[in-house]
Image (spheres, rainbow, N blue to C red):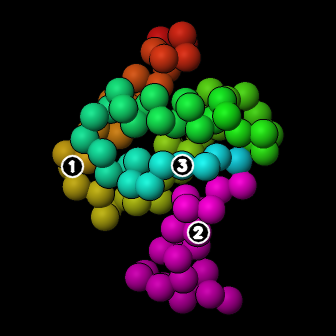
């Protein structure tokens, strides 16, 4: 099974496929590498609201994708970028009126 091959092999490819080919959201290229939390949140919000394939609310879809990326990137994320993405969660809540 490819996902059980260990670090640096199938697992990375699996999460990359999910992030890039999500059936629920069409993400802008490189969205999770941006340095502006408000821009990241706005992009995720636009993608979630425009999607006709998502199965839950736009807020939940956007937050789920952001959380998924943070959890899957794990040790590979720099401390600075992880902080940006955590702030993007707060910004996403604010943009959806849930803060």
Q: Residue at x 30, y 45 (%)?
A: 34
Question: In the rendered image, is residue 96 in sight?
Answer: yes
Marking on residue 17: 2
Residue wearing tag 3: 27
Q: Residues within 10 Å of mark 1 (few under 14, many from 20)?
A: few
Describe the element under mark 3 as helix, strand or loop.
loop
Q: Residues within 10 Å of mark 3 (few under 14, many from 20)?
A: some
> Relative to residue 58, is residue 33 drawn left or right?
left
Highlighted range, magenta: 1-23
Describe the element under mark 1 as helix, strand or loop.
helix
Marking on residue 34: none
Question: In the rendered image, is residue 82 in sight?
Answer: no
- Number of marks in the rendered image: 3
Q: Earlier in the sequence, mark 2 or mark 3?
A: 2
> Residue 69's spot in the image, x, y percent?
47, 52
> Relative to residue 96, is residue 85 drawn left or right?
left
* Residue 14 sits in quarter: bottom right
**Is 65 drawn above or below residue 40 in the view shown?**
below
Quarter in which the N terminus is drawn: bottom right
Describe the element under mark 2 as helix, strand or loop.
helix
What is the C-alpha distance between the residues marked 3 and 1? Answer: 23 Å
Q: Are marks 3 and 1 in contact (CB under 8 Å)?
A: no
Is residue 3 magenta-colored? yes
């Amino acid at each position: 099974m490819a996902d059980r091959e260990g670090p640096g092999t199938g697992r990375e490819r699996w999460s990359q496929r999910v992030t890039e080919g999500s059936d629920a959201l069409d993400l802008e290229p490189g969205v999770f590498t941006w340095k502006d939390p408000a821009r990241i949140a706005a992009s995720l919000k636009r993608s979630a609201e425009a999607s006709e394939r998502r199965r839950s609310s736009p807020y939940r879809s956007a937050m789920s994708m952001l959380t998924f990326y943070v959890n899957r990137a794990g040790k590979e994320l720099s401390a600075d970028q992880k902080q940006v993405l955590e702030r993007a969660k707060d910004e996403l809540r604010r943009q959806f009126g849930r803060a």
